[in-house]
Each structure stands twice: as C-alpha cells, then as structure tokens.
Amino acid sequence: MALLTRARIVDQARSIVEADGHEQLSLRGLAATLDVTAPALYDHAKSKDDLLQAVAACGYEELEAAYAVSGDRAIDRVRERALAYVAFARDRPELFRVMFMFRPRAVAIEADNELPAATGVFDAAVDDVRQAIADGDVVERNANTLGLTLWAAMHGVATVATMAPPVAEAVAEDVIDALLAGLRPT
C-alpha cells in the first residue's frame, strides 16, 4: 500500500472532483478510493472544505502556468491571458468551478474564503493592465478596477464555456476584443 500523504489525498480528491464534480466528493468515499478509513484522512486534511481549497490551489497553479503567455506588449498579454482563462474553464470545467468557490484578495468582500493562489493569478493580470495603461494602450483608470472589469467579463464567458464550449470559443475573442477596443484612449 502506498504511503498516505496530503499530496496523494489532494490528487485523489482532485480526480474525483474533475470526474464527478465537487458535490460528489465525500471524505468517506475518498478514503475508500485510497483504501484507508475516513479517520485516517484527518491527519492530513481538516475537512472537505480544506480539501476543496487544496484542489482549487492546484487549479490556480495550472492556470498560472497557462498565463505564461508571450507578447512584447502588455495589451497583447492581457488578451492572451483572457483567452487562456476561457480555454482553461472550457477544458477543466469541474476544476474551474471549485476554484471559484474561493476568491482573490482583490475582490474585497467580507468572507472568509480568500485563497492566496487566486490572488496571484489576479495580480498578474492587473500588472499587465497597469503596464498597458502606462504604454498608452488603455485609458487611464484604476488598474484594479479595469482588471476586475476584464475579469468579470471573461469570467462570464468562461462560465458559459463550462456549459457550452463551442459557444465560448466563438465568443471569447469577440468579447475581449470589444472590451479592449472600448478601453483604448480616444
């Protein structure tokens, strides 16, 4: 029998989430797939929510890797990251849903569900928006507000991507291009 580690538990939880959805994840069922008793999991995970947060963090790490786009201009990176975001949601719908059970710090709402990995992904996008403003490719406004605006629009397209992938592919480029055109200085 393989050694029971948090990494092994999280990997198995993630497999269940991606195959069946987070609603189907239970500690008892997870323990059975690992050939251990449910109490054995508590040495490595406090709760189902703890495991879902760990699964979400893995998803954000993958999204951050997908965000490693090329482009000399910040405005091009904004566009490519937006499209990578939608593609990630399309390709990993269940993981994407779990990721957004937890918020980035920049979404300033009173809730105890902040996930540092989410914050890193959001901050990378805002850094490109900030640079696009400095480059004169985007109107001078608050970079956090513009980043949140772009994220909200692309999150909507990404959510559609989890339900109807062909629709999202057709719409994602049009949406980001329309948004960026509307943000160009006059």
Image (tube, helix red, strand yellow):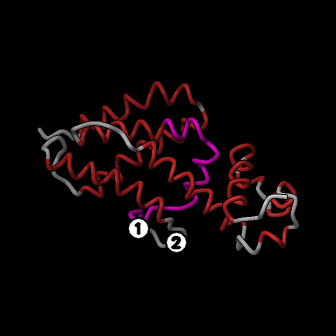
Of 161 and 10, the residue lying toward us: 10
Q: Residue at x 45, y 68 (%)?
A: 109
Q: Amino acid at mark 1?
A: Ala
Residue 100 lies within the magenta run: yes
- For label 2, the residue is 111
- 50 with respect to 126 (left or right): right
- 90 with respect to 110 (left or right): right
- For label 1, the residue is 108
Mark 2 to mark 1 CA distance (whole Å):
9 Å
Image position, residue 50 (x, y; %): 66, 68
Of 42 and 1, the residue lying toward us: 1
Q: Residue at x 48, y 47 (%)?
A: 63
Label at residue 17: none
The secondary element bearing badge 1 is classed as: loop
Q: Residue at x 83, y 61 (%)?
A: 31
Residue 96 lies within the magenta run: yes
Image position, residue 22 (x, y; %): 70, 53
Q: Residue at x 50, y 30 (%)?
A: 168
Question: Which quadrant: the N terminus?
Answer: bottom right
Q: In the figure, 139 relative to 120: above or below?
A: above
Image position, residue 171 (x, y; %): 44, 28
The secondary element bearing badge 2 is classed as: loop
Highlighted range, magenta: 87-107
How busy is the neighbourhood of tag 2: few (under 14 within 10 Å), some, or many (20 plus)? few
Q: Amino acid at mark 2?
A: Ala
